[in-house]
Amino acid sequence: MIPPRVTSESSPPLDDAELDLDAAKRLIADPPNRLAAFHLQQAAEKLVKAVRLTRGLRLTTENNLEVLIAELPREDAWRSKLTVVEPLSGFATSYRYPSSMGKRKDGPPETRRSSGSRPSQR
C-alpha cells in the first residue's frame, strides 16, 4: 500500500489535524469537556481531506466523513482504513450548537463526569 505523500497542499491540513488532536486530548482530561468530540472530528476531517488532496481530489467544505471517504477511489487502500472515523461526523455540530428549541446536548458519555454532574462547559 502506498501511503499518501505529504505535499505542499496536504501539509497544512495535516498540521491543523495535529492541533485539533492536541486540543481533543487536552479537553478530554479531567474534568472532560464536551467540545473534545468536536476537535476529534475536526482532526479526522482534516486527515481525510489531506489524503484526498494527495489523490488529486478537490477541496470541499463538506464535513460528512462518510461522503468525503466515499469519493476516494474504490481501490485506494486508505479508503478502508479511514472508514473507522466515519462515526465522528455527527460531532461536527451535535454538541456545539443548541437545538432549535434552545437546548444543548450534554456531549458524548465520555465527556460526562462520573458523579452525574453536568460536564464542564469550558
Image: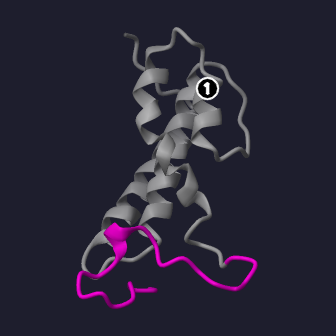
| SS under mark 1 | helix
Query: Which of the 4 quarters of the picture holds residue 96?
Result: bottom right
For the C terminus, the quadrant is bottom left
Residue nearest the observer in this picture, 13 or 31: 31
The residue lying at 34 percent from left, 78 percent from top is 112
Image height check: is 122 above or below 23? Answer: below
Tell me, yes or no, whether the highlighted magenta stretch contains residue 1.
no
Residue at x 73%, y 83% (from the top left corner): 101
Which residue is at a point 71% across and 35% down the rendered structure image?
59
Q: Where is residue 110 in the image (x, y as percent from the top left)?
A: 32, 68
66 displayed left or right of 118: right
In what quadrant of the picture does the N terminus appear?
top left
Q: What stretch is highlighted in magenta?
A: 99-122
The residue at which mark 1 appears reads as 70
Q: Where is residue 61 in the image (x, y as percent from the top left)?
A: 73, 46
**Which image quarter: residue 78?**
top left
Badge 1: residue crowd in 10 Å (few <14, some 14–19, many ≥20): few
Is residue 116 or residue 67 the one in the foreground? 116
Type of colouring: one colour
**Residue 44 vertical position relative to residue 58 in the rendered view, above or below:** below
The relative height of residue 68 versus residue 33 in the rendered view (above or below) is above
Q: Is 107 included in the stretch rendered in magenta? A: yes
- Percent coordinates x, y for residue 30 in the rendering: 24, 79
Rendered image quadrant of residue 57: top right
In percent of the image, x 55 and y 71: which residue is there? 95
